[in-house]
Image: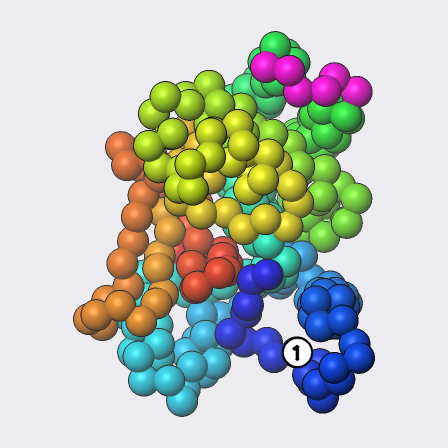
Amino acid sequence: MEQNNAQESPTKPSEYDPNVNQDELIMAQEKQIAEEIKANTAMVGSLDDLNSLEQEYSNDPIYSGKVKTLLPKYSKIRRTRPDGNCFLRGFIFAYLEYCIHHRDELARFKKYLEGSKEELFKMGFPKFTTEDFHDMFMEVVSDLEGSGSVDRVEAVCNDAGTSDYLVVYLRLLISAHLQKNAEFFSFFIEGGRTVEEFCKQEVEPMYRECDHLHIVALTGAVGVGVRVMYLDRGEGTTVASHDFPEDTTPIIHLLYRPGHYDILYNKA
């Protein structure tokens, strides 16, 4: 499970009891932590000043120093729930927010979505469930065409049923792109697994964290540029960045901290 450096769980480890199944105990504790995160953290939070991140790391000279290098370019941040779906929720929110201000992009995305369902069917994804996820995404996009606003995007992305359906559909699109390009992506999958096995284990299930391959596949499939700023303990004071795809101008900016993604906003 992802760990958010800004949030510590109140759950305390229990004392060791040799009569208790430790695997079951760990699973129960992990479930409790997940429920606490779910209860206390919005799927996508409200807009906040990036200065709040500097304050969060005020006692960490490495991270606070790197945050300072972000401040000249970025001014705001939206935090996402650290539940394994944070990259996808961040992507959905930032992209839909962009689309309501760029109607030509919203129309392009809607056209892409319309054709994506049949492509998934041809690849063997189950029609009944896939159609449900697709129809929900189409409903959201059609709704934004008529009543698009940031408030509406916030409501959609924080409604559990709707948000989860959108996340699932993106996971299917990622899986399809990886499998269509299996010859290429197979070189990057460890553990002797096939691309299909990787998709079944690491892509399609909910709450599985997204890594480099997920991002490459999603941005390639949808045709949306994303820039990820990597806040880590690497050498130097600057924050490394990577654009996906490399030849595309990013319209979405995300902040990565080990195991977690949040949304960044450029200074006006």
Task: Between residue 115 and residue 232, name the one nearer to us.
Answer: 232
Q: Secondary structure at mark 1?
A: loop
Rendered location of residue 167, percent (x, y): 64, 40
Give the magenta range.
123-128
Q: Residue at x 71, y 43 (%)?
A: 164
Task: Between residue 99 and residue 189, name the one nearer to us.
Answer: 189
Q: Decide whether residue 124 is among the magenta residues.
A: yes
Q: Which residue is mark 1?
A: 9
Instruction: Note whether 114 is above or below 48 in the view shown.
Output: above
* Quadrant of image for the C terminus: bottom left
Q: Residue at x 61, y 18 (%)?
A: 120
Rendered location of residue 193, percent (x, y): 46, 35
Instruction: Note whether 268 is above or below 92 in the view shown.
Output: below
Rendered location of residue 117, percent (x, y): 64, 17
Instruction: Specify whether residue 198 is in view.
Output: yes
Question: What is the chief secondary structure element of the magenta stretch?
Answer: loop
Q: Is residue 76 left or right of residue 160?
A: left
Q: Is residue 228 left or right of residue 153?
A: left
